[in-house]
Image (cartoon, rainbow, N blue to C red):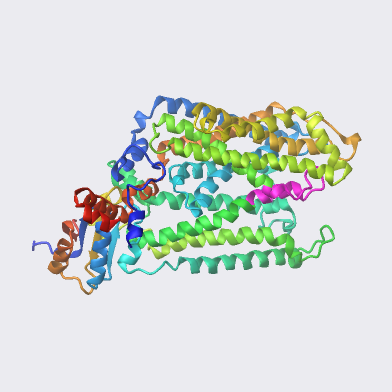
Amino acid sequence: MNTAESNISPSAPVDAPLITGNQSFSSVTRRISEIVEVELKKTPKAWYIAFSITSSLAGMMTLMIGWLLWEGTGIWGLNNPVGWGWAIVNFVFWVGIGHAGTLISAILFLFRQRWRTSINRFAEAMTIFAVICAGIFPGIHVGRAWVAYYMFPIPNQMDMWPNFRSPLLWDVFAVGTYFTVSCLFWYVGLIPDLATLRDRAVNKVRKAILALFSLGWRGSNRQWRHYEKAYLILAGIATPLVLSVHSVVSMDFAVGVVPGWHTTIFPPYFVAGAIFSGFAMVMTLAIIARKVYSLEDFITMHHLENMNKIILVTGTMVGYAYACEFFIAWYGANTYERAIFINRAVGPYAWAYWTMVTCNVIVPQLFWFRRWRRNIVWMFIASILVNVGMWFERFVITVTSLSQDFMPSSWDYYTPTIFDIGIFIGSFGVFLTLFLLFLRFLPMIAMSEVKGILPEADPHYYKAQEIKDKQVIGTEGEQVQLS
Amino acid sequence: MPEEIKKIEGVLAEFGNPKELLEAAEKVRDAGYKRFDCHTPFPVHGMDAAMGLGPSRLGWLVAAMGFAGTLTALAMQWWMSAVDYPVVISGKPLFSFQAFIPIIFEVTILFSAFATVIGMLGFNILPRFHHPVFYSDRIRKATDDGFFLSIESTDPFFREDKTKELLTAIGGQEVEYLVAND
């Protein structure tokens, strides 16, 4: 007993506090709630400016998609060997970005990484918005988007069912499930915080809306009991799910016979890359949100440094995968495989390949050094470079393999058109528009979870505090007894 | 008009911190009460034991529904690929279950996730917008920084005066009756 008590003594050396600025429960509530409780009229001008830019980009994308549906996929740069262009690259890019949100909310939860509470809410939001962007691309890439429902196992006029042996169909199920589960997970996490906002609301309409969505939550322990179990189960099932999603995405390629795609390393390689790019996106957004909303006490340097460590680990894993691919291409002695890899490094797309290697493998290596891990300007630049690199990774995989496959007579160079580029930029508009709405209307940090990791949240804290008080005022004899 | 008959539906007390609430819950439990609850801004560690609650049985429901998802996906793919629309693809058998595994997995997860969320809400009887604790204005603090204990009048041990005295005796502050205010 005595040892147990001395272990929890607040004077014992512990890691740097997760939340700084001497926060109390109510200061956490106030600090996070006030951001979303600003009157509509008093929304910062910068928000409106950002929103008008992002929503214009989203509007531009909508117009371009309209033109695409009218005119057909010929407006894209696709050509005969390269039937998968930017649409597929963007799809894989956006799905990958989503993965970090689930990693933070589910996998770090299972590993009891308590620092996740400051960033999980908006990482989860980012997941949902990224998957929405991802979902746009296969939908329009099918060409005849009005028959996209053929992808789902629903009865149709041809009396046909989809081919369940195709990885493309697995994708429909994987991404569909991923989106649904991410939304459920996110909403479950939001319920206690919506109740907090409900209880603070002064405006009647606002209160009614929040009451509706917080489902009458009253923070009772009988509810928390099932709630915590539900959260644990969701984390438990989201973990294999997130690993499966990008594995299935990778099988879209790996199951094909195209050289450069047909490799068994693809599933783990894609998952590592997905988490890598997703963390970089969380980093980009976190640095901006932290600065704009002055949340330095909640998203501390400690959080950013931890994220940089994960970027370093996953970036190095991705670098290993690149090396491994090259090794196997040589060791496997398959002529086409060898040729495609040599082509990637020195062929017509070498510029894309080396952009990818520089951004993904070399840039994160600076994070070995504590100084660079804690340098905000550098980590912001690095997080953007990583996503540039990860976009190029998908471009290199998709386009280099297709543009130079088995028959030299069918080779062709692929160049995007203005519509490829416009729709991609527009998807950032959709993503950021949704993200801005989220920042404006929903608590971007999980208040109930952050309160739960404050030292005061643990009943043992007060026992330890009593012991400490006694030690201060007690005699030497008592101190010996206690220690 | 006769004087309004006010029905007391429970008692609510506030405690200073999670530890005090935890100890209060233990005492209320030991006094024999069953229909009482603690209201906290976050789940308090050890509270389930202090209130005498067992572990949540949600896991069983999820496991059952997840298994139902497995069977649904298997049956769907078998029936669609091997019975209703048999087409030989890549020379594979009609019922090539290996290729069906990814979708079986995804549907299992999908069913489990819905079972988790709907089951959690079902066990918690949510949504429920009306509850005696909401009669108190101070309960709003429970989602901010307040730690409350409520005992419902439906509890067989509940006595208007004695229950209130008990909560005061174990350190409850601002003990109040929960009475419908309109």
Height in image: B168 above or below A22? below
Nearer the observer, A314 or A250: A314
Query: Where is residue A84 drawn, in percent x and y?
Result: 75, 39
> Does residue A35 appear to the left or right of A59 in the view shown?
left
Height in image: B27 above or below A59? below
Q: How many marks?
A: 0
Residue A379: quadrant of the picture: top right
> Does residue A278 appear to the left or right of B145 in the view shown?
right
What range is drawn magenta here?
A245-268
Query: Where is residue A41 drawn, in percent x and y?
Result: 35, 29
The residue depicted at 33 percent of the width and 33 percent of the height is: A39
> Does residue A287 appear to the left or right of A221 in the view shown?
right
Nearer the observer, B11 or A237: A237
Quadrant of the image containing the C terminus of chain B:
bottom left
Residue A349: quadrant of the picture: top right
Height in image: B23 above or below A290? below
Q: Is residue A328 magenta?
A: no
Query: Where is residue A195 drawn, in percent x and y?
Result: 34, 49
Nearer the observer, A200 or A396: A396
Query: Where is residue A135 drawn, in percent x and y?
Result: 62, 43
> Does residue A61 appear to the left or right of B19 in the view shown?
right
Quadrant of the image containing the N terminus of chain B:
bottom left
**Res A220 seen here:** yes
The residue depicted at 75 percent of the width and 33 percent of the height is: A74
Outermost residue toward the left in this view: B2
**Res A64 seen here:** no
Q: Is residue A266 magenta?
A: yes
The residue depicted at 58 percent of the width and 45 percent of the height is: A99
The residue depicted at 59 percent of the width and 55 percent of the height is: A240
